[in-house]
Image (cartoon, rainbow, N blue to C red):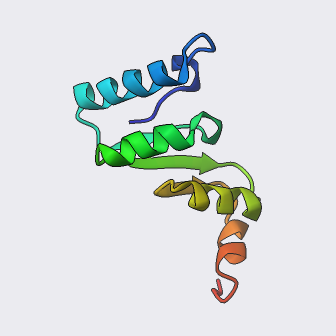
Amino acid sequence: MIVNKNLLEDWMTPEFVISFLLDYMKLTQANILHLNLEKYTPTLIKKFHDSNYLLHTHLQSDDIQLYKKITEFGIDQCTFDNINLIRLIKPSLSY
């Protein structure tokens, strides 16, 4: 389920966001949550993993440090715009 960044508003507490998204996942029968990276929190990640959901985000840059943050957070999947990030992740790959 791809969550539009406008769906989550500033007034929503972190607990409300988690409950809202978990309910939405159940309603839509989705199994992967796609959020912008800044919306992920350690608590959200744990709650979703405990509920057997996968997590996904997207990078628009080739920032290897940001990619490392994603993997350290425990986000399961990541897509990105810049193919050069693959070379930074796995330098031994040739294209």
Q: Which residue is found at the position 66% from the left and 89% from the top?
A: 92
| Residue 62 visible in the displayed image | no
In the rendered view, would you say 83 is above or below 90?
Answer: above
Quarter of the rendering occupied by the C terminus: bottom right
Q: Which residue is found at the position 66% from the left and 57% from the top?
A: 69
| Residue 80 visible in the displayed image | yes
Left or right, residue 31 beside residue 87: left
In the rendered view, would you say 67 is above or below 51?
Answer: below
Quarter of the rendering occupied by the N terminus: top left
2 vs 40, nearest the viewer: 40
Q: Position of residue 68 (x, y in %)?
A: 67, 63
Q: Position of residue 6 (x, y in %)?
A: 57, 19
Q: Position of residue 27 (x, y in %)?
A: 24, 25
In the rendered view, would you say 93 is above or below 53?
Answer: below
21 vs 2, nearest the viewer: 21
Left or right, residue 74 beside residue 29: right
| Image quarter of residue 39 | top right
Q: Which residue is found at the position 28% from the left and 38% from the top?
A: 30
Left or right, residue 45 beside residue 91: left
Q: Which residue is found at the position 48% from the left and 48% from the top?
A: 56
Callout count: 0
